[in-house]
Image: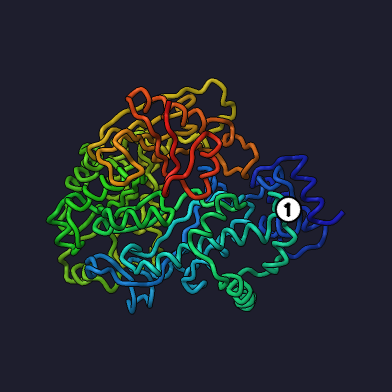
Amino acid sequence: MGYYQELLEAIREEKPDKQKLSGIKLQLCRKYGMKKIPTDIEVMLNTDCDPEIKKYLLAKPQRSISGVIPVAIMSRPHKCPHGTCTYCPGGPLSPFGNVPQSYTGKEPTTRRAIRNKYDAYLQVMNRLEQYTVTGHVPEKVDLIIMGGTLPSLSIDYQEEFIMQAFRAMNDFSSLFFRDRKFNLSSFKDFFELPADINDPERLARLHIKLLEMKNKPTTLSCEQEINENADIRCIGLTIETKPDYAMLEQANIMLSQGCTRVELGIQTVYDNILKQVNRGHGIKESIEATRTLKDLGFKINYHMMPGLPGVTKEMDISSLREIFHNPDFRPDMLKIYPCMVLRGTKLYDDWKSGKFKPITTEEAAMLIAEFKPFIPEYCRMMRVQRDIPTNMTEAGVGKTNLRQYVDEIVKEKGIKCRCIRCREIGRTSIKDLSNYEIRIMEYSASKGREFFIQAEKNDALIGFCRLRFPSQQLRKEITNKSAIVRELHVYGAATAIGQEGDIQHRGVGKKLLEMAESIASQNNYEKMVVISGIGVRSYYKKYGYAQEGPYMVKQLE
């Protein structure tokens, strides 16, 4: 019996935590005279460990705790059509190089994009490879397109970029899955593993192989159709944009591309501040984009930026509270990005000349902690800081673990937060799902009616469904008797398609959907319209839904 075989036996018998696992590894290294302790990734690459073993070796379990695997990719560097916001770094020919607008080139996603030449196919393949070697099941992908306002680029570029992302998921499926089972041997052979994953010569060889595959003729609609039943399925597609590029024309294009969630750079609710930082839009556009997108079924994620020039702490708190107090806003998700000072921006010049004093780490943490109690339970706090390394900033928040500081303040002051992220069941030890409750929260938003339907146990959120009675009919598929399911999500660690996990695939989603249908019927709606990720269409077909345009629809009894 060799090192790896004995290690697997020890894991199977002792079920160790990370600290104990490190001790077992050290003992076996001494026994077998090994000079270096293998990482968890190296263990998985050198063995055919089963799922029971793999969960003790997962490199970053938080990645899949919400039930899906996020795959973020970057579009090519391009300037915003309106110009540049005063605080915004990066962009073509910036002091950071030829990088996407609002990035420095040092963020993990940007570095991966640069390494893969901003090619969507190569980026997705690379990310799926990374997830696989860290032990995650990459079968349900939440695809996120970053790099600036994608809808401002040409339609041809958008279609090609998104098509290549879908093609990568489909090709990964056909290359490494047989009868719904992952073939580790073929994966290792193709990616030349085990090996130094940062070896540039290996990367160059992989690029040659992959680029030959991606150049075969195809179309976006063809790749979307394939993805409906692929082993690696796109369950959601997110596009980032400014509100003025999220109007009806752009929204209809995003629907055809398979988009299900839109991240809107709102930043603040003060028109004079938006004008001062050269944002290129006002609150009017933010409100119109929000309503249009919701009435088409999209999920909405707001980006807010406290600490902008001319804004006090009291104004920031008021701005953050306004987006939930005012029914014209009320996003489903929220990212808070405190304003930072970076080279090459007008804000940097203002800071150097003493005209601008940035928000500090302590001030930002306190601000966010004080705001947390005002986040409604239908909203998920996604992030509280940009992914920009702090060594790239000149002033402002100086810690990349700002959320940890916020959590410490929340705990110290006894602040309660009821946002989705803080309540999701994957962060608890609850395994028994019997006797869970369905609770409904109704609220008005963007001139429509929203129903947040929750499955919960002991206040832990198992799953939820967002049902909307739209305020206007913007497409032929959405009649005046149509209700819209904007999101259906069940939490828990990512589970392979067709298999039963701790929480997923246990009928919770079906019960939430049935409740949404019942509420719609009781309110005299005759048709249910679902904005579905391409890879989730087959799920809705099981419950009587059929495709109509970009949606899945069903006539209600």
Q: Find disc 1 in the rendering and name its residue.
A: 25
User: Residue, x 77% and y 48% (percent of image)?
Assistant: 8
| Crowd around label 1: few <14 · some 14–19 · many ≥20 (10 Å) | many
Q: Name the foreground residue: 432 vs 365.
A: 432
Q: Quadrant of the N terminus?
A: bottom right
Locate residue 325, reporting x and y percent: 22, 37
Q: In the image, 438: left or right of 7? A: left
- Above or below for 24 versus 122: above
> The residue under label 1 is which amino acid type?
Lys
User: Residue, x 23% and y 55% (percent of image)?
Assistant: 307
Instruction: Please identify the residue farthest to the left as the structure is shown.
Output: 272
**Does residue 276 appear in this view?**
yes
Q: In the image, 431: left or right of 51? A: left
Q: Quadrant of the C terminus?
A: top left
Locate residue 214, reporting x and y percent: 57, 70
Locate residue 489, reporting x and y percent: 47, 38
**Does residue 333 appear in this view?**
no
- Above or below for 257 versus 215: above
- Above or below for 483 versus 523: below
Q: Name the foreground residue: 87 vs 298.
A: 298
Disc 1, SS: helix
Q: In the image, 18: left or right of 89? A: right
Say which quarter of the image contains residue 374.
top left
Instruction: Please identify the residue farthest to the right as the structure is shown.
Output: 1
Locate residue 400, reporting x and y percent: 40, 57
